[in-house]
Image (spheres, coloured by chain):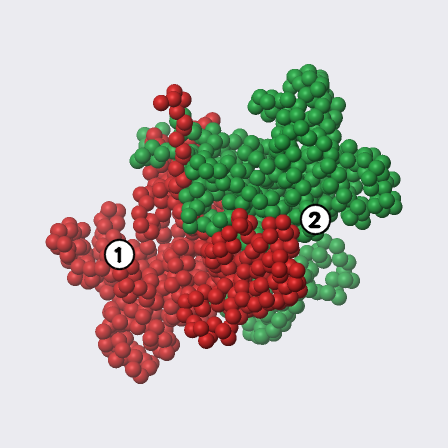
Chain colours: A red, B green
Amino acid sequence: MAKDKKQPRPKAETPKGFRDYFGADVDERKAMLDRIAQVYHRYGFDALESAAVETVEALGKYLPDVDRPNEGVFAWQEADDETWLALRYDLTAPLARVYAQHRNDLPTPYRRYAMGPVWRNEKPGPGRFRQFYQCDADTVGSASMAADAEICAMLADTLEAVGIERGDYLIRVNNRKVLNGVLEVAGIAEDDTRAAVLRTIDKFDKVGEAGVRELLGKGRLDASGAYIDGVGLSDEQAGPVIAFLMAGDEVDRRLVAGLELAKDLPKGVKSHIQDARDARDPVVAKKLSVSTEAFATRNRMMLKYLSEVVENSSVGAEGVEELEQISGLLEAQGYGPDRIVIDPSVVRGLGYYTGPVFEAELTFEILDDKGRPRQFGSVAGGGRYDDLVKRFTGQAVPATGISIGVDRLLAALRAKGRAGVEARGPVVVTVMDRDRMADYQAMAGELRAAGIRAEVYLGNPKNFGNQLKYADKRGSPVAVIEGADEKARGVVQVKDLILGAQIAESATLEEWKERPSQVEVARGDLVKEVAKIIAAHGGDDG
Amino acid sequence: MAKDKKQPRPKAETPKGFRDYFGADVDERKAMLDRIAQVYHRYGFDALESAAVETVEALGKYLPDVDRPNEGVFAWQEADDETWLALRYDLTAPLARVYAQHRNDLPTPYRRYAMGPVWRNEKPGPGRFRQFYQCDADTVGSASMAADAEICAMLADTLEAVGIERGDYLIRVNNRKVLNGVLEVAGIAEDDTRAAVLRTIDKFDKVGEAGVRELLGKGRLDASGAYIDGVGLSDEQAGPVIAFLMAGDEVDRRLVAGLELAKDLPKGVKSHIQDARDARDPVVAKKLSVSTEAFATRNRMMLKYLSEVVENSSVGAEGVEELEQISGLLEAQGYGPDRIVIDPSVVRGLGYYTGPVFEAELTFEILDDKGRPRQFGSVAGGGRYDDLVKRFTGQAVPATGISIGVDRLLAALRAKGRAGVEARGPVVVTVMDRDRMADYQAMAGELRAAGIRAEVYLGNPKNFGNQLKYADKRGSPVAVIEGADEKARGVVQVKDLILGAQIAESATLEEWKERPSQVEVARGDLVKEVAKIIAAHGGDDG
């Protein structure tokens, strides 16, 4: 072996948990974000783009006094003054920093939106990445419930603007204060116990009423036979929590029983929702959309029921009052419960919410990995957080906002076939004679000038088959061919690659004869012919 | 002092060298990048978005075997396997990694564009930031000069598409091989000496022919009186370098002397360029744009002259031949020397270029910080780099591309008043009666539905003056007012804030009377009236 060994080649690998996006994937996300930005802009929200990097101190959550504070975030230390810097893990923490820093120059209230990648230093897994997009809109400096209502209305408009039809989504609204009121009424004061109760509430969808009752009490044998320790509440303490959780069912029961509303309910609705839980099922709700107006009353019934549950808690009553305001404002603007509903089961993970919380759910079904239908689920969430800016300034600044899960919403649009970008390759002008590159480039130039995406083949032109394979890989609609013979006769061959592929796959010889996939046209008619073929296949996105 | 001191508040500060972009700044950059992407797309380039994070190993340049390899990049170590990760410092290194990793799935040649932030761990300074945007287009896998010519043509189209008029920019093309040929002819073989010569060539614009001659030789007293050591070349070695540097002057001299072209030169041109250097001055060239066709010959004369300078070097001859191909292809497509010129003075800093190099310069004058006119200068650069992918695969892959300095180009558009985004705030619906928020939101909703950017004031409505101040800060064109009185009479007040500001600033009382800045209209005419006012001020961007 020689002494000075060659350095090994670096591996060409995306770092673990990161990924590359190609072509149409980038275009589709961009098109969706553009549509979202347009709605936000029209609502008076201004764009904000802060840097990817913040001081760890400003990000909060992670403290600079440990040796390497990069749990959860990607962090490193500045060489000169040992400040810890980190990549932002969301768009809310930077907003709090920006607002505290620039508050004298910004309008109050400050409506802003932000779109961009955030980073999480977590163990990557299937579908779990360490860099992903977020898309947020927040109003800072307004304590008015009108700000929360506006966020919900804007979210509904946004979902429709990107291509989610009304009826295919539902925005659920709850209020942390109502939850706190329930905990107060139940006599649960310790933070740890409160957190355990919230975690249990979040499991309601999985384990149902009986399961939650067990988990709030002594504990529960789960399906695998393992014993899950309970929170240890007494039956009396668990009571208000269960009553709160069953709000949906209870309201639906009252609705169905016709105690309050029998005469408003359209014919047939009653039989549809004999199973009270049906009424909370958005798929059923969608089927019942004819009865939207009758169901508007359901929100009011829900609020009444909740006020009963928390009647001995002032914070709880405040929460119900806030929900009433939001609900009233939204209904006045025509955002009825077919789009936005009061739903006590919405908890939202983040600890910093202090009032209303929102969650947007897509209610249509898709097939999961195993081909089973399931509801698409949550694509956006948010709420009011009045304490974030206080960290910096000492003064509480009311704020409320929403964050859209960009990748999930995009996946939903794709599942619905509404990602809206023509993923078509360019027209490929093939090279028959490498000394006539200028001629071929002139053709591409003419096509582009007519708004048609086009390129000249720039690989080794020797093997013509490779050029057509290339065009195929590019998803090209058309290949243009001009050999010496064509040149001499003043013509070009225009090959319809989409039709060609269709013929190759399915057509009978008969059809093939009637619609040849390659035509010869005068050189001067090149652009006209290509445009015709592309139009026949559904337009161009050049 | 109490024992458990409160934790100090974090500072609300952008980390050193980073910045926040607000509103119109974000919109303008986005609008520009959208226009660029449209041109790239039409040329057949596909979007690529790789992650911000790469392994230090893949980035190259910085090696993982030192203790903290974060010189120049922001780097940190993975917790589990101690891999060093870093933020990308440009978009080319990630492209090389992506191409090496995905080459079997990508078309060859692969045309891609990428836009996004890059990060440099450098000392920040005035106008020098540690995160900034780049916007690249590259063709990987084609050795053809047609790929380089295409990049240049596309760059010209791009500059015009974003709003730089023809005549306001010039794309200069050189070839590293010609430079290497000159060094070969001069008998300069050592890498260090070659690098020193290249650095000296770069100073030509500053110190002129005599200065370069001194710096290539023994050295030179600079303006401050300090002595700058020279490269130490003999006069014979310096000769070819000087001849190369003077190519522009020499060609112009020949041109002016009419040795080859006298009869082609339009009347008056000769007198314009009595000072030969004038002819290289793009401002003069622009004035002479009538003579574009005659000047086309200048490229050919330049190529002939360069081939004389490097005639004993095969690599030099190869470089001239490549320039001839590029020049020929571009001229055939109508990209004459009024847009793209051969210019031997283009060196380009980066060491990895192996063939043609490009630089786009804006030739119009702007005023510098001290109010003196100066040419705007370079906004894009690039070239051919055939060795980047080889690091990963061992196989050389030809590649060529261009990188646009996004911030500089945007600054140029702003200087020209062509950033093209209406930086107008939303219509503000003021709140006279806080119990009627739903009414005000209905107005905003109607305006939005008509495509007009609008919002309801969400601050404390008590002080009406604050609401108008807010509207002013937002740059609102119109404020809408509906108090109890208006409500009762079924009308609204519509206040033209732009006109109001004009009146406040300059108008006489007479004018004010004729055009009141506030009108009362029927509630039903709100949208019509607002639209009319906005149209009168030059349209809406809602």
Front-most of B290 and B322?
B322
Secondary element under disc 1, as helix, strand or loop, is helix
Residue B473, x across and y down, in percent:
59, 52
Q: Specify whether A471 is left or right of B505.
A: left
Callout 2 crowding tier (Cα within 10 Å): few <14, some 14–19, many ≥20: some
The image quarter in which residue A328 lies: bottom left
Q: Specify whether B255 is left or right of A78.
A: right
Callout 1 crowding tier (Cα within 10 Å): few <14, some 14–19, many ≥20: some
Residue A184, x across and y down, in percent:
26, 54
The residue singled out by tag 2 in the image is B331
**Residue at figure coordinates x 63%, y 31% from the top left:** B314
Residue B425 shows which numbered tag?
Answer: none
**Residue at figure coordinates x 68%, y 46% from the top left:** B328
Residue B391, x across and y down, in percent:
45, 35
> Which residue type carries mark 2?
Glu
Q: Nearer the viewer, mark 2 or mark 1?
A: 2
Q: Specify whether B23 is left or right of A361.
A: right
Front-most of A252 and B114?
B114
Label 2 to label 1: alpha-carbon separation:
68 Å
Q: Is residue B9 in view?
A: no
The image quarter in which residue B43 lies: bottom right
The residue singled out by tag 1 in the image is A202
Q: Is residue B13 above or below residue A35?
A: above
Q: Is residue B526 in view?
A: yes
Q: Is residue B482 above or below residue B78?
A: below
Front-most of B408 and A383?
B408
**Residue at figure coordinates x 38%, y 76% from the top left:** A293
Secondary element under disc 2, as helix, strand or loop, is helix
Label 2 is found on which chain of the structure? B
Q: Is residue A363 above or below residue A468?
A: below
